[in-house]
Image (cartoon, helix red, strand yellow):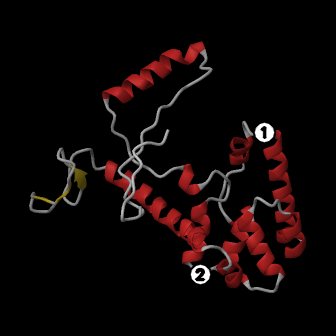
Amino acid sequence: QVAGLEYTNEGLAPGRLSGNRFQVMLRGIDADLSDRVAAAVKSINKDPRFLNYFGLQRFGNQRIRTHHIGVALIRRDWERAVRLILGDVSIVATSPCVDTAIDSGVSGKTRRIRRRVAEAQELFLKDGNPRRAHDHMPSNQFIEKTVLLALSEGSDYLQALQRLPRHVLQLYAHAVQSLIFNFMVSRRWQRGDVVLPGDTVLSDTSEVVVWNEMGDWTV
């Protein structure tokens, strides 16, 4: 449901979203697990705080995650970035068991598309034929097809990446930032749940304030 729409003179920018609200419905719960689910819900109601990690929406759910590609871009390793985009799992440390989780609960159509993607990737990664790989790649794989078309036309790795929209390349870089954020949140939590100098918090008046080294609040 979309509500509260209005015209404004300013567009939305990253960081302007105040929050999301979700309703989660659990279906088909085994009776043997009902007590555990009830206990988990009760614990959330008792202490609703949580660590605001970035999740799969930012990193993806494939064996090659967006931050893998982002690191290659930041290092200016254009060939590695292209090979990662085109599914070269041999150059990243991933667990084969991820494949089982990825394929669980997907439709037959999705499985067929993924199989065709894998075949197209192999045409490039093993046979070195970007034209055949491009032609075999499903039409909904915009990023892969864009890179493969550029390579088939004689572009080098950097030029092929430059064919991609800027927001796509930014997504990979932002994934690296998000991973660093997750690590820092974990490190911060190890120091306890009390406010420490340098913490940014939301006060009762909805003002963003920072606890500084002198023990004073600053807006």
Circle 2: element type: loop
Tell me which residue sits at (66%, 56%) in the image.
94
Task: Give the residue drawn at x 68%, y 78%.
Answer: 163
In the figure, 152 relative to 105: above or below?
below
Left or right of 177? Residue 136 is right
Residue 107: assigned label: 1
Question: 190 and 105: which one is in front?
Answer: 105
Q: Position of residue 214 (x, y in %)?
A: 9, 62
> x and y percent of residue 71 in the render?
56, 70
At a point 43% along the width and 20% down the height, the residue shown is 39
Given the current orientation, which residue lies at the most extreme front position? Answer: 7
Q: Kindly identify the residue that appears in the image at 65 percent across and 60 percent down.
A: 93
For numbered disc 1, what is the local secondary structure?
A: loop
Question: Quick one: label 1, few (<14), some, or many (20+) residues within 10 Å?
Answer: few
Q: Name above or below for residue 116 compared with residue 73.
A: above
The C terminus lies in which quarter of the figure?
bottom left
Give the CA separation, mark 1 to mark 2.
37 Å
Which quarter of the figure has residue 198? bottom left
Kindly indicate the quadrant of the structure image that contains residue 106: top right
> Disc 1 marks which amino acid?
Ser
- Say whether residue 125 is visible: yes
Q: Is residue 116 above or below residue 91?
A: above
* Residue behind mark 2: 76
Nearer the N terminus, badge 1 or badge 2?
A: 2
Where is residue 132? Give x, y as percent. Answer: 90, 71
| 156 and 92: which is toward the camera | 156
The residue type indicated by label 2 comes to Arg
- Asked if residue 156 lies left or right of residue 77, the reply is right
The reply to whether callout 1 and callout 2 are in contact (CB within 8 Å) is no
